[in-house]
């Protein structure tokens, strides 16, 4: 599991193997947005929220391209959620949407792996979203992107399962960042995952799941059974 030790921006140390590139640092926090595509909210029987819904994933859930998602014994249904994540490049507190937009330093494919049965059972989602290996992230595509026109695609064993454009989001990425920054300071290196579109589904041991932001970033991971 040494693969999910990254360059540490605080110490400048590098325990990372070979270098995955992409300028990625282990984030202080991972903020995730829930129910930000109408069709996805509907498929799980939820209303579209009137204001953004967000939660945190622990940074210990992160791993890289090629590492295995481990199905935990506590869950009978683990699902993929293909998402577009943004990397925060400069500190955001009480930021406007345009300030938030300027503070994004890169974009990265992220899989918000979720134990759906535990999510339904628990009144909050830390357990369902927080298992080790539940946050595969790809290489960061640095620089400016058109945040209102990115396409996210999920494939399981090569078959397309999700596809959506950020222009279908309920709340835009700059709006989400501004909103979150009025609650908690977003710091350089933090990741914000912007929600999954319709088409989520279960993973089983032996599957390979790939999230791609079209032409920008991708992450592919095998799935292994409980250990
Ligand atoms: Zn999600």
Image (cartoon, rainbow, N blue to C red):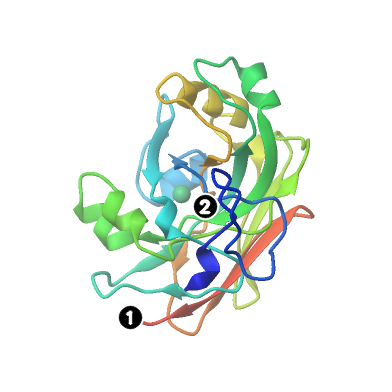
| Camera-nearest residue between 2 and 200 | 2
Image coordinates of residue 214 in percent, x first then y, are 75, 54
Q: Nearer the viewer, mark 2 or mark 1?
A: 1
In the rendered structure, the answer to whether residue 221 lies left or right of residue 133 reads right
- Tell me, for residue 192, which label it has, or none: none
Q: Quadrant of the C terminus?
A: bottom left
In the rendered image, the vertical position of residue 116 relative to residue 147, given as above or below:
below
| Camera-nearest residue between 40 and 145 | 145
Question: What is the quadrant of residue 121 in the picture?
Answer: bottom left
In the rendered structure, the answer to whether residue 147 lies left or right of residue 72 reads right
Residue at the spot x=50%, y=19% of the render? 93
Image coordinates of residue 164 in percent, x first then y, are 64, 49
Give the labeled residue for mark 1.
226
In the rendered structure, the answer to whether residue 22 lies left or right of residue 114 reads right
Callout 2 crowding tier (Cα within 10 Å): few <14, some 14–19, many ≥20? many
In the rendered image, the vertical position of residue 106 relative to residue 26, given as above or below:
above
Q: Is residue 193 visible?
A: no
Mark 2 or 1, nearer chain start: 2
Give the labeled residue for mark 2.
198
């Amino acid at each position: 599991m040494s693969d999910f030790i990254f360059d540490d921006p605080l110490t400048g140390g590098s325990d990372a193997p070979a270098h995955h590139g992409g300028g990625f640092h282990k984030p202080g926090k991972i903020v995730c947005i829930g129910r930000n595509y109408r069709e996805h909210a509907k498929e799980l029987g939820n209303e579209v929220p009137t204001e953004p819904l967000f939660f945190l994933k622990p940074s210990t859930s992160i791993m890289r391209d090629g590492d295995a998602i481990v199905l935990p014994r506590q869950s009978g249904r683990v699902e993929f959620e293909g998402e577009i994540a943004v990397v925060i490049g400069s500190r955001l507190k009480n930021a406007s949407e345009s300030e938030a937009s300027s503070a994004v330093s890169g974009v990265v494919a992220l899989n918000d792996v979720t134990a759906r049965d535990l999510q339904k059972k628990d009144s909050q989602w830390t357990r369902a979203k927080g298992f080790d290996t539940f946050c595969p992230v790809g290489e960061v595509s640095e620089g400016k992107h058109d945040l209102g026109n990115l396409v996210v695609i999920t494939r399981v064993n090569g078959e397309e399962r999700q596809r959506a454009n950020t222009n279908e989001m309920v709340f835009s990425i700059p709006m989400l960042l501004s909103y979150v920054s009025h609650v908690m300071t977003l710091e350089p290196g933090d990741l914000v995952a912007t929600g999954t579109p319709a088409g989520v589904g279960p993973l089983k041991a032996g599957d390979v799941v790939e999230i791609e932001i079209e032409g920008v970033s991708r992450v592919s991971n095998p799935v292994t059974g409980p250990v």
